[in-house]
Image: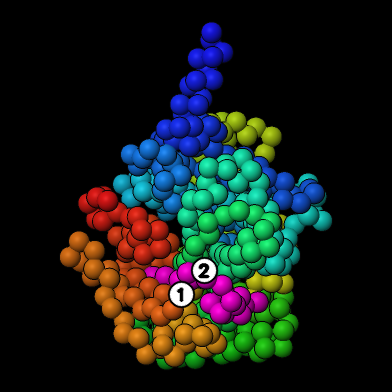
Amino acid sequence: MSGLLISFAVLLALFNYGAVNARTGYGPGEQDWGFVDVREGAHMFYWLYYTTANVTKYADRPLAIWLQGGPGSSSTGFGNFEELGPVDLYGDYREWTWVKDMNVLFIDSPVGSGFSYVDSSSYYTTTNKQIALDLVELMKGFYALHPEFKQTPLHIFCESYGGKMAPEFALELYYAIQRGEIESNFQSVALGDPWTSPIDSVLSWAPYLLQLGIVDQDGHDKIEAAALKTKNLVDGEKWTQATLQWSLTQSVVLRESKGVDFYNVEKPTRGDKYLRLLAEMNPEERMYNTLVHFDINEDRVKLLEDLMRGPVTEALDITDITWGAQRKTTFNQLMGDLMKPAVHIVEELLNSTTVQVGVYSGSLDLICATLGAVNWIGSMKWNDRDKYLSSPRVGITVDHVLEGYQKAAGNFSMFWVKRSGHMLPADNPAAMSHILQHYTKFGLDRRGRL
């Protein structure tokens, strides 16, 4: 009799929510997590938060993927606890969590990020294409475990270096669907403050800082000279050298600005003390600390690391993996790919697929400044280019407040977001809710209403 009751309870849960794998993890609501072997020796980790919305079935709400940057930064760590998950770094409930409206799937990509890991150095990824193919394999494994989501609208969101990973992942996923290799209701990919055209980002630093008054003309000229050296190496396809010169350009920016924060130019920094601390690092350390750690404030980095390696590891019962242990090697393995553009991938998405594509950019971001995004978008060759360039830019108003601007044509949209740096979901959740609504048809206004 007890076995029948258990079976009935499982069937009832499946009927009500469409999920039999739901578990109690860390934070509110039902969750699931696990590893998918994307290749021999390569194990990718995902963490699914089922929506906390009042729904008959979880699959009635969209599934949103979140990919972090770096490469090597953790979606399950940084994106989850610093930007959009249900609880923040201190364990407090986040009012603006995406989980209130939709199912959210955090993926530690590439392998070696977060809880994802490789068995030996030969299994790290070294190209964007390898990362994309790994992500497709992850989704095949995810759908095998969660077939209830196969017909659920799928949307990919990302940040920073994710702006290189996500377009190629989207393209490979689309083609895999067309070939019948995977069943998925994939609909959109939106690139947040993206590193899609690295050299356009680097070339935007000098004019942006000059316009804000953060550097003077002399500082502008020194930054521009370093950026142009980076461009010459990119033009010559000397990719690793270009990456190193990118780091040197970053050093010039820090020196001339007295230590401006690359992720939000209005964020308080330690000025010359900040500058001296970075100056003591070699180029590889400096790149790693700004791209993967995001913040030279080691106290905050340690808070996240302690959370992930302590309470989260215990709650998820991942005792044999050390979160973040391979992130530095993951970054170093991709140094030859760091400065390569993915603009041609975005063009192919726009010209050859039905996928909705978007870019959203915070006005206070320096590392992937809006000016750089506008420049590479303007240079794209795609079917609706002329229509896009001539289309009007309209305001984004949420709860009677102007949060930014939007411009669209065909299957492409661009969003300019006010009062936001690089971590846009955390900096301006109201504007982010508009972007979510645009793609998923679900989002919160400033008072948390549907």
Q: In this orientation, does residue 383 appear?
A: yes
Residues under labels 2 and 1: Cα distance? 7 Å
The residue lying at 69 percent from left, 34 percent from top is 320
Is residue 73 found inside the magenta-colored segment of the image? no
Which three-letter amino acid code belongs to the residue tagged 1? Asn
Q: Residue 411 shows which numbered tag?
A: 1
Residue found 41% across the figure and 88% down from its top: 387
Q: Is residue 106 above or below residue 192?
A: above
> Whole-percent x and y of residue 201?
52, 79
Towards the viewer: 360 or 210: 360
- Identity of the residue furthest to the left in this view: 400
Q: Earlier in the sequence, mark 2 or mark 1?
A: 2
The image quadrant that residue 352 belongs to is bottom right
Residue 126's tag is none
Query: Which residues fall within the magenta stretch?
Result: 340-366
Q: Are marks 2 and 1 in contact (CB under 8 Å)?
A: yes
Query: Label 2 sits on what residue type?
Result: Val
Picture residue at 60% right of the left edge, 46% below the top = 143
Q: Is residue 279 visible?
A: no
**Between residues 296 and 277, which one lies in front from this camera angle?**
296
How far from the left and from the top, in percent, is residue 345? 61, 75
Q: Can you say whether 269 is above or below 212 in the image?
A: above
Residue 365 covered by magenta stretch: yes
Residue shown at 47% from the left, 69% from the top = 356
According to the picture, the residue beneath numbered tag 2 turns out to be 355
Q: Position of residue 381 (x, y in %)?
A: 55, 87
Q: Nearer the viewer, residue 366 or 95?
A: 95
| 76 on left or right of 370 | right
